[in-house]
Image (cartoon, rainbow, N blue to C red):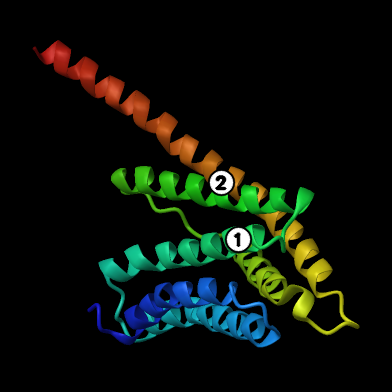
Amino acid sequence: MLTSLPNLLTLSRIAVIPVVVGLFYVPEAWAAYTACSLYAAACITDWFDGYLARAWAQESVIGKFLDPIADKLLVAATLIMLAGFHRLTGLSILPAVVILLREVLVSGLREYLAGLHVGVPVTWLAKWKTTIQMIALGFLIVGDYGPAELPVTFIGTVGLWIAAALTFYTGWDYMRAGLTHMMAEQPAKSAAARSARSAG
């Protein structure tokens, strides 16, 4: 199943990361626009791979494993390069930190809940967050190479702050749902332990 089209699209998202990173080191407008185009294409595959997997009944364990990892690797690499090349500076780094920390939190939460056989559904607000974040990062990749009459960096920065606010809210929402399952799991284990001691 690794060679199915949905999984190949997911893998292409990972494969494009070194190219996007490498283009940051080329101080030319064409490199910025190429990096933005590749990033945008990778973001589009994020929707297509899931849609095709469901439509063609090609959902697989490896696909479910790789899909969120590909997204997080792409976003993390882009944010780090933007900060490293001073396209995110000062307070503008804070939303990047919030986004990265939230990704770590949700990844750990999903891993723990998977052990309890509990799924964490993606909310519509989280989907909006992802969309705004993708658009904002695209603008920031182009940065000062954009049209002089358009405040490209400003638009990207504002978008990133909005995405960070939604990130914080949805991260807390996921954490609250996870804590509910964690708290329910503890009494269940305690009750099982008491029953075992009584039986002994």
**Residue indicated by mark 1:** 79
* Above or below: residue 139 compared with residue 84: below
**Horizontal relation, residue 100 to residue 88: left or right:** left
Which mark, residue 32? none
Helix, strand or loop at label 2? It is helix
* Above or below: residue 61 compared with residue 109: below
Q: Quadrant of residue 186?
A: top left
Residue in front for this viewpoint, 64 or 125: 64
**Horizontal relation, residue 158 to residue 64: left or right:** right
**Horizontal relation, residue 104 to residue 2: left or right:** right
**Residue indicated by mark 2:** 101
The answer to which of marks 1 and 2 sits earlier in the sequence is 1
Residue in front for this viewpoint, 129 or 38: 38
* Cβ atoms at labels 1 and 2 below 8 Å apart: no
For the point 52% across and 52% down, the residue is: 103
Q: Which of marks 1 and 2 is in front?
A: 1
Q: For the C terminus, which image quadrant?
A: top left
Residue 7 in the image: state x and y as whole percent.
Answer: 33, 78
Helix, strand or loop at label 1? It is helix
For the point 75% across and 54% down, the residue is: 89
**Residue type at numbered disc 2:** Leu
**Residue type at numbered disc 1:** Leu
Residue in front for this viewpoint, 39 or 181: 39
Residue 46 in the image: state x and y as whole percent.
Answer: 49, 76
Measured Cα–Cα span from mark 1 to mark 2: 12 Å
